[in-house]
Image (tube, grey):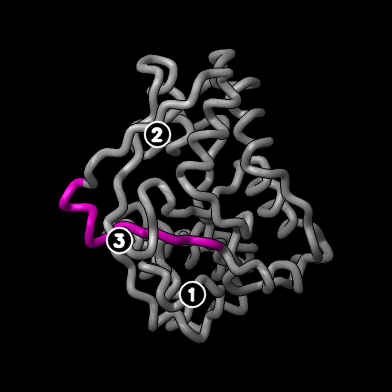
Amino acid sequence: MENNYRFSIRLAEWALSFGKRFIYASSASTYGDGSLGFVDDESRIEELRPLNLYAFSKQLVDLWMKRENVLDRVVGLKYFNVFGPNEAHKGRMASMVFKMTQLALTEGRISLYKSNDPSRFADGEQVRDFIYIKEAVKRTCQLLEPKFRHCTGLYNVGAGDAVSWNRLAKALFSALGQKEKIVYVDMPPELKGQYQNYTCANMEKWVKTFGQYKAASIEENVLEYVQHYLLKGETW
């Protein structure tokens, strides 16, 4: 709450008071279980039901912006599952690509959670919208271009592609040049009620505002991250 909510509000108040552009990181986790979709619609913020405290703290910032009637003066970016260089310091909060690489290198296997909803998702077929950090940075910096400085409100920042954990694991083994070995383990009880089985950014609003884009595939991005950074020890 201190970092994600109170500090964000203090920064926003300063920026708004001095007429500075304010762009803040919201999160796709605010969409909760996804039953209401993943559309960056400011009119429906109150309907969202985050599943954990991190997501709740992010949701509070979006709600504050709307309550204070400043969404037309700021930009909130709902980042989806970001991965890539410069995340080693995040520890357990580092991306699964980073953590799975360490496991594959040391144990020759990758562990994935068994499905907590087998009628809809087979083991490892739960999906996420993974976006490479370079792509996320590129899109964030677009907002600093003079022609887009008038853009305000909430925007999704994702690849717009639902990728299963199995596909991600296979891409990682391929990047490492290793034989695939996936092990499915039970999901911890504390996660079962707050686990997102499906996330995929609706990018229609972004495309309408900033134009179409061509993102690289998850296989291409994992290959670059693993071979150009992780295997070379280029982590910080």
Name the residue: 47% across, 54% down: 127
Question: In the figure, is residue 209 to the left or right of 58?
Answer: right
Relative height, residue 211 to residue 226 (above, below): below
Q: Nearer the viewer, mark 3 or mark 1?
A: 3
Mark 2 → mark 3, Cα distance in angstroms = 29 Å
Say if mark 1 contacts mark 2, CB within 8 Å.
no
**Image mark for residue 117:** 3
Residue picked out by circle 1: 37
Q: Main secondary structure of the magenta part?
A: loop
SS class, disc 1: loop
Q: Residue at x 63, y 63 (%)?
A: 20
Give coordinates of residue 87: x percent, y percent: 48, 32
Could you say where residue 30 lies in the image, as x and y percent from the top left?
40, 66
Residue 79 appears at what percent x and percent y?
53, 56
- The range drawn in magenta is 188-200
Circle 3 residues within 10 Å: few <14, some 14–19, many ≥20: few
Q: 165 above or below 33?
A: above
Which label belongs to residue 90? 2
Nearer-N-terminus badge (1/2) = 1
Task: Say which residue appears at 54% left-offset and 50% top-offset.
Answer: 163
**Amino acid identity at mark 3:** Asp
CA distance for labels 1 and 2 = 29 Å
Residue 218 part of the magenta segment: no
- Kindly indicate the quadrant of the structure image that contains residue 171: top right
Residue at the (56%, 16%) spot, across then down: 231
Mark 3 or mark 1, earlier in chain: 1
Q: Nearer the viewer, residue 118 or 42?
A: 118
